[in-house]
Image: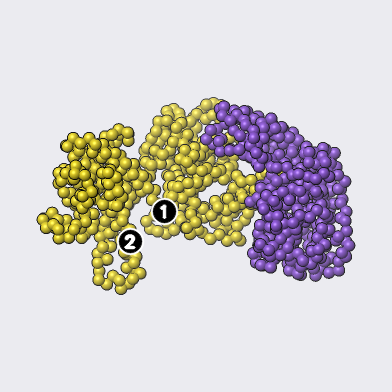
Chain colours: A yellow, B purple
Amino acid sequence: MSCFLRKSLRLKGFSLFHHILASSTWFSCRHFSHSHSLPYNNTSPRFLVPSGSYSNGYWSQHNRFWTSETAATEPSTSDGLTLQGILSYNWAVLDENDSDWKSHASAIAQSIHLIKRRLQWRKLKVRLDMLSVQLNKADLWDDPVHAGKISREHGSLLGKMKEVNALEQELLEHIDMIKLARQENDQDLESESLKALLNMRREAKEKELEALLSGEQDSCSCYIEVQAGAGGTESMDWAAMVMQMYKSWAQQRGYKVTVMDEMPGEIAGIKRATIKVDGEFAFGYAKAEVGVHRLVRISPFDSNKRRHTSFAAVAVIPILGDGSTHVQINESDLRIERFRAGGAGGQHVNTTESAVRIVHIPTGVTATCQNERSQHQNKASAMAVLQSRLDQLEMARQAQLNAHHTQSLTDITWGSQIRSYVLHPYRMVKDLRTNYEVSDPDSVLEGDLDGFILSYLSASLDEDEDEA
Amino acid sequence: MKLSLSSVYRPYRFPTLINSSALGRPFCSPALSSPSTILKPQVPLFLRPPINSTKLCDLKKWHDWAKGVATSIGSAFVHSDNGPDSSLLCREIKWLMEDAVEDHSVFSHVGLEGDECVKMRVDIEELYCLWKQRVQERRPFQYIVGCEHWRDLVLSVQEGVLIPRPETELIVDFVCDVVSKNEDLKRGVWADLGTGSGALAIGIGRVLESEGRVIATDLSHVAVSVAAYNVKRYCLQDKIELREGSWFEPLRDMEGKLAGLVSNPPYIPSKDISGLQAEVGRHEPRVALDGGIDGMDALLHLCDGAALMLKPGGFFAFETNGEQQCRALVDYMENNRSGSFCNFEILADFAGIQRFVIGFHQ
Ligand SMILES: C[S@@+](CC[C@H](N)C(=O)[O-])C[C@H]1O[C@@H](n2cnc3c(N)ncnc32)[C@H](O)[C@@H]1O
């Protein structure tokens, strides 16, 4: 019963404490007495106060607070523990299966912290206050369009803020519960609260990931392209290894992988290749891989067994959904060519090669597809690639116009060197942007990339924050 | 428009249609060993029931063997007659496996190792046989798997029927363009002469309005049977009618009524037949390829017929051997059929070869 209640209360977004007061008749006596032994939490912004029923200092203070809507004091547990406090204790985050409340609490606090950073918390509060001021102006609705805009933004920001505040509140309440259970030696309550904390930990982790991937195109599917750097066979072999790494990574993540285009090297490897990665957030993750990847190893192609350095460049292109605006392509701006054409064609020739290349003449952007079994389908797929490339180019152009973004076009398409893979004389993969490193290159080349990706994504949050 | 009916309907003179085995080579397919019997078209490999079972490791053995064979070819075929190189052959191996194995997604998560079994639409011995035919006899890949992917269709093909070419796909685009601008043509009756596998007829049938119909003709009994099979597979029996016979012979009732007429008739000059790529020359039906001395026999005949069969404003599109034939055809229309046609255009395929003549009836 109580477990169910707590869950349903949380769903409604109400403070547990409020419910202990307001719906005490639902509670078993035991739980009721627990609630009584707790000092009142004095910070919940969700406290719904029955007007006039209390007149002590606490309530009036709370009422004042309620009107300003944004939190003024930091929420804490009964013994004064705050989110910042939890973070500063730096309690070790253990495996989920270790039922240690501090570990859970620490993990949840970190997630909340990250979500706040992603939302640019301080800026968000300032903006919200500003909007509140505007909303309170008497003449606001003289300009209904403007007023509508303001109140929509206010509503949406407030919603985000409340959601995070609720998480924080819930965490502190669970901690209170656990401490209380220990005091009272109530093992049922303790294990129940621990379970709730664990659930919350998972939930917060999911929210954290969502927050990391909240960019406009992050949820899109994408194309990943790998191109061999200078250096002939050596680099083409490396490009093929990199492509294989992404195929495995994508498959392990449950994405659907389709090879769109592959230009094999003369002796080994690939000159370039494009794969389509289908699934939620494919772009959000894969965009962390844009840039040049460097390999150091003893070359398998060098009979003198010398050490070689090779490069492969990776580009990632989001596939915008139907809802977004696409660049309009004029049929007359396209030149469509048969790939590897030659000879008389038509009835003279039997071939299973039906690849086409589409050139967008004004921009020089091209797309080739050869994985399909008919020319028509190859053309359709190549058109889709071309559309995404032109969309990306347009977004990059827009971003450049927008003063906030200083990224150059080349940064967006191919980027600079981001990661080193060393197989000799020592073994290590190191990300040059985050310094994240792993001493087992094989696992990375087999697609174990999430560590690199997530550390990069959170590091770019820091950058955003610095910018802010 | 002085046109003698008798010349259009006269039994067409077949330049070299003595026998399909004029090249002195027996066909592999039983279908052609007795071409006159009522033909039951072959079911493409990918549609056959997966009643065979093979261990993944045995499949891998086959795969490695097939790949070895393909690799050993190098560019030998390219040099001898512009045939496939080993990278193309390797891709065909992949596609052959896709068609032969019931659930080919097993490869991505299991790989090709182990004792696990996969369900197959053909047994492994036959798979060896098929690949040998592909490389040793140069039997076209499309006859091996019994289908060709053409536009967004998968068409059944077999010995005796021309494998539709990618170039020809464009004719459907032309028709799309024309009918999107003209509701009347969209609802009319179209003809595809020399339909082969039914490719053009089916492609066009799918872009016409519900009242629109297509009559598809072919002289070859095998072609008509296979086309009928394909029409049925796309549930277009109500829309596409097949008629067996030479060019306009089966269309006497349609004089002056056709909204559109398309054809990819045989257009290769007879002298070039012997030098064709092995897959084509040794395996595809000569009646589908040989266009007479200059390759224009059928095209000129079709031109004459189009003038008679199309209604005013009706559209035509012909595929040709290239620039020379396109020019000759346009000359012929201007000089011999002047006043019958208008708005001619010569259009190129994606390889940049001037391939098509399109236009309208006055
Ligand atoms: C080049 S194939 C084209 C087949 C099909 N339309 C395509 O594009 O794939 C030419 C077709 O014309 C047919 N044909 C040859 N002579 C014919 C004739 N006298 N009357 C009708 N069809 C004929 C052949 O049987 C063959 O199917």
Residue at image mark 1: A216
| Along the line of sight, the residue nearer the viewer: A103 or A360 | A103
Which comes before the other along the chain, label 2 or label 1? 2
Task: Decide: is B134 above or below A23.
Answer: above
Question: Label 2, label 1: how many angstroms apart (C-alpha)?
Answer: 17 Å
Q: In which quarter of the image is residue B247?
A: bottom right
Could you say which disc has been placed on residue A153 in the image? 2
Question: Which quadrant would the N terminus of chain B be assigned to in this image?
Answer: bottom right
At 24% from the left and 64% from the top, the residue drawn is A133
Q: Residues within 10 Å of mark 2 (few under 14, many from 20)?
A: some
Could you say which disc has been placed on residue B305 in the image? none
Same subunit, tags 2 and 1: yes
Question: Which quadrant would the C terminus of chain B be assigned to in this image?
Answer: bottom right
Percent x, y of residue B299: 80, 57
Percent x, y of residue B46: 65, 41
Is the residue under label 1 in contact with that under label 2 (CB below 8 Å)?
no
Percent x, y of residue B81: 75, 40
Q: What residue type is labelled 1?
A: Glu
| Left or right of A375, for residue B306 | right
Q: How crowded is mark 1: few (under 14 residues within 10 Å), some or many (20 or more)?
A: few
| Left or right of B225, for residue B120 | left
At 49% from the left and 48% from the top, the residue drawn is A222
Q: Residue furthest bottom?
A: A142
At 86% from the left and 51% from the top, the residue drawn is B14
Q: What residue type is labelled 2?
A: Glu
Marked residue chain, label 1: A
Marked residue chain, label 2: A
At 27% from the left and 46% from the top, the residue drawn is A6
Q: In which quarter of the image is residue A63?
A: bottom left
| Left or right of A454, for residue A385 | right
Secondary structure of the residue carrying numbered label 1: loop
- Regarding residue A247, the answer to whether it shows in the image is yes
